[in-house]
Amino acid sequence: MASGITRQAMLRHRWTLIGPAITQMTGAAIIATMIAANSSISRSLTPSQLQNVDLVDLRDATIVFLGISIYMLIIIVGVTMNLAMSRQMRDIALLRSIGASPGQVRRCLARQAAIIAAPAATIGFFLSLPVCHFWLELLRAHGALPQNVTYVATPIALPIVIGICLVTSVVGTLIAVIPASRRPPNTALVRASIGNLRISATRTIIGFLLVGAGISASIVLTKTSSEHAGDAALFVILAECIGMGMVAPLCIRFVTKSLNALPSKHTLRLAVDDLDTITRSLSGALIPLILAVGFTAVKIGGFGTIMHSTHHHPAPEALWLEYSGTAVYGIFAAVAALNCLITISIARRRNLSVMQLAGARRSTLVSMAAIQTLIITGLGLAMAAIVALATLAPMMHQAAHTWVPYFSPATLTAGVGVTLGLVAAGLVLPTLMLTRKRPIAVLIAED
């Protein structure tokens, strides 16, 4: 019976489970690539060659990249699984109403997480094989590796990535469903129907504490060496991004109330009112979005400010290694943010159909999604800018005697454009797709 319920739940919510699977697959590929790259370097070179200072630094950087990948995977997979499982709150309430215990509900959803994680991690491992080979070629081409370093397969990476994905998926799922599984059936049904409109004070306080801790840590890092400060900066950014995600519902509510106070047209009012109903879901999607933009801004702004203010240029191979690593993590977080936004769009398929039956035209709903894209992009960029500035300002004052990080106009324009395109791909394009079917057919299929 339990396996049957799990199978039916996965069939019913298969589209919302694709996002977490893709996120896990991407993260597994990155982790396996870093493991294989470090192993290939160690096994291709002689002991005397491995004593070379540049190679020691490169191997250390690879290990740091691996650690960063694992931490990012834990957080991002937890966020995406939490968001995907929140789509099953109504099903959880129905199971509770027919006698299912909280433990049975949690085990059912944990099985779903495990079923998704294992194949996603396996696919990610096999994707890492050509990716690692290409990564090593790039390192050789840019002079960061000797030409005799070749790719060496590392099978041990497979159980490692599967284990990490399994643990993060199951833990993220259990965290998401524990409150809902403990609610009385009637209360759970009401919450599933109207959503959790209340913003927890505890959540908000913890969020502000994490942001404050991140800012304090960035100040402390100015007292350490630049090498250690750079390695620890990511953990500062992670704390700030999680904190920003936890206070995001408060920020979204403030923005929606401010916009509602302005004289506005029907489409803007519709967009703002609809945005207010998905506040909690959007807060989860903002974490990887802020992480992608904030982490990229810290790396680019750090090097850019030092080169602009002091005219000191790092070695080209070192700069390329840092920028390429930043691109990998930025893309990983961006993929997770896109998956979260698409999951949110799919989750409101029923609401879109109801709006159509109430007389809203398809063009109106697409315009609504476009307005929401602008709002979320602006909010995400503003929160990411706070994270980047709080992390960079103390370090840049210490290293370059300036509180204001430097970004070229082209970099800023590209950052805004990419972020806007990413959010539009997660909100506008799914709305175009979801409103193609007859609304009554969608409602019948949902029920």
Image (cartoon, helix red, strand yellow):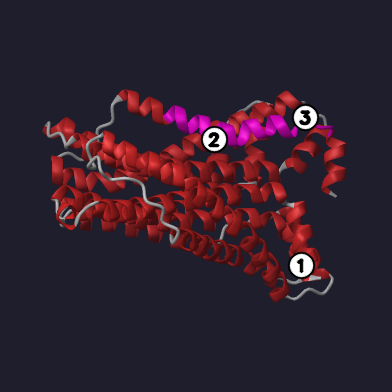
Horizontal side of residue 144 vs 328, given as left or right: left
Horizontal side of residue 378 vs 190, given as left or right: left
**Discs 3/1, front:** 1
Check disc 1: other Cα within 10 Å, few if <14, some if 14-19, many if 20+.
Answer: few
Horizontal side of residue 445 vs 27, given as left or right: right
Q: Which residue is mark 3?
A: 436
Q: Earlier in the sequence, mark 2 or mark 1?
A: 1
Whole-number angstrom distance, CA of label 2 to CA of label 1: 36 Å
Residue at the location (33% across, 60% down)? 213
Residue 423 image label:
2
Can you give x and y, in whole percent of width and height, for residue 293 in the image? 41, 40
Front position in the image: 31 or 380: 31
Residue 131: image quadrant is: top left
The N terminus sits in image quarter:
bottom right
Residue 420 image label:
none
- Above or below residue 236? Residue 320 is above
Secondary structure, mark 3, is loop
**Discs 2/1, front:** 1
- Above or below residue 56? Residue 433 is above
Inspect the image, locate mark 3, and give the three-letter code of the amino acid beneath it.
Answer: Arg
Q: Earlier in the sequence, mark 2 or mark 3?
A: 2
Q: Would you say residue 443 is visible in this rendering?
A: yes
Residue at the location (54% across, 35% down)? 423
Residue 3 image label:
1
Check disc 3: other Cα within 10 Å, few if <14, some if 14-19, many if 20+.
Answer: few
- The reply to whether discs 3 and 1 touch (Cβ–Cβ < 8 Å) is no
Secondary structure, mark 2, is helix
Can you give x and y, in whole percent of width and height, for residue 207 in the image? 44, 58
Which stretch appears magenta?
416-438
Residue at the location (66% across, 56% down)? 86
